[in-house]
Image (cartoon, rainbow, N blue to C red):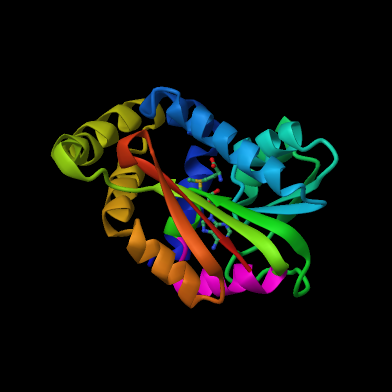
């Protein structure tokens, strides 16, 4: 559960360096994760997709590429991040708080949220709001960080808490924002805990796919 004012300010400060910092810190893996999401979304054959917390629009752009006939809307409450999404070619952008979105019930065939849910003030309320705007039998996809299980868990936590904030601090001058990132990953539910949470918010059949040894996960469910 995060403080929305802190989150909005933190992203507005790093907006101009967000994309390149992501690629460096993940060694480019984040690009492959978004490509995978694009392929899953294309399999839904949707007419309309809402990419919530779209930020600089990397995922919305990937979906536009994979689904050229789909109407893709990117929404975010940070205007500085969203300005980059619009500049980069996201065709429709809407400034909106994911906790109370300006969309009618049952508006979208599918909804994606990448590295966004973790930053929201209340994960359950946010998922219920997402459920509200997805059409019945429509799709939800959450992509977010998780902690690897097994032998990788300890070295990864060392990287996350000690190494990553230092590299990001040098790249962005905002090391505290990346210490915050590490803290949110530690707190965020993953695996069965997350699929149970998604199902408790109205969705059915939530399932989890770990990516890159569990460093991130894709969760899908039906509304
Ligand atoms: C880590 S970035 C992810 C951006 C993009 N989805 C990606 O994959 O790169 C998180 C984004 O979530 C947005 N965000 C966090 N809480 C939000 C909320 N309550 N409503 C809308 N956007 C929110 C932030 O402004 C930020 O742009």
- Reply above or below: 94 against 176: below
Seen in the image, is 180 located left or right of residue 41?
left
Quadrant in which the N terminus is drawn: bottom left
Dominant SS in magenta: helix
Seen in the image, is 82 located left or right of residue 164?
right
Instruction: Report the residue at 65% width, 57% height from top.
Output: 111
Residue sitting nearer the eye, 101 or 64: 64
Residue 54 position, x and y percent, is 61, 47
Quadrant in which the C terminus is drawn: bottom right
Seen in the image, is 31 located left or right of residue 175?
right
Residue 191 position, x and y percent, is 35, 56
- Reply above or below: 187 against 15: below
Seen in the image, is 119 located left or right of residue 98?
left
Instruction: Report the residue at 57% width, 70% height from top.
Output: 99
User: From this viewpoint, which residue is outermost toward the right?
Assistant: 69
Residue 131 position, x and y percent, is 62, 71
Residue sitting nearer the eye, 99 or 9: 99
Instruction: Report the residue at 25% width, 39% height from top.
Output: 160
Q: Which residue range is magenta in the image?
A: 120-133
- Reply above or below: 172 against 77: above
Let me know if residue 193 is in the magenta part: no
> What is the quadrant of residue 151 in the picture?
top left
């Amino acid at each position: 559960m995060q403080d929305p004012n802190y989150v909005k300010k933190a992203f507005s400060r790093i907006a101009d360096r967000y994309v390149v910092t992501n690629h460096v810190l993940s060694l480019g893996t984040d690009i492959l994760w978004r490509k995978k999401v694009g392929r899953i979304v294309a399999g839904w054959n949707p007419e309309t997709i809402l990419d919530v917390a779209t930020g600089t629009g990397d995922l919305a752009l990937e979906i536009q590429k994979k689904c050229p006939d789909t109407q893709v809307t990117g929404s975010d409450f940070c205007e500085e991040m969203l300005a980059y999404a619009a500049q980069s070619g996201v065709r429709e952008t809407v400034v909106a708080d994911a906790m109370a979105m300006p969309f009618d019930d049952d508006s979208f065939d599918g909804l994606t949220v990448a590295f966004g849910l973790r930053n929201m003030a209340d994960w359950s309320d946010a998922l219920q709001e997402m459920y509200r705007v997805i059409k019945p039998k429509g799709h939800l996809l959450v992509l977010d960080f998780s902690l690897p299980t097994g032998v990788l868990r300890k070295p990864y936590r060392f990287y996350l808490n000690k190494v990553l904030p230092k590299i990001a601090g040098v790249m962005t001058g905002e090391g505290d924002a990346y210490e915050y990132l590490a803290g949110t990953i530690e707190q965020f539910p993953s695996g069965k805990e997350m699929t149970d949470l998604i199902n408790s918010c109205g969705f059915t059949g939530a399932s989890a796919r770990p990516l890159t040894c569990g460093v991130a996960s894709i969760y899908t469910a039906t509304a």
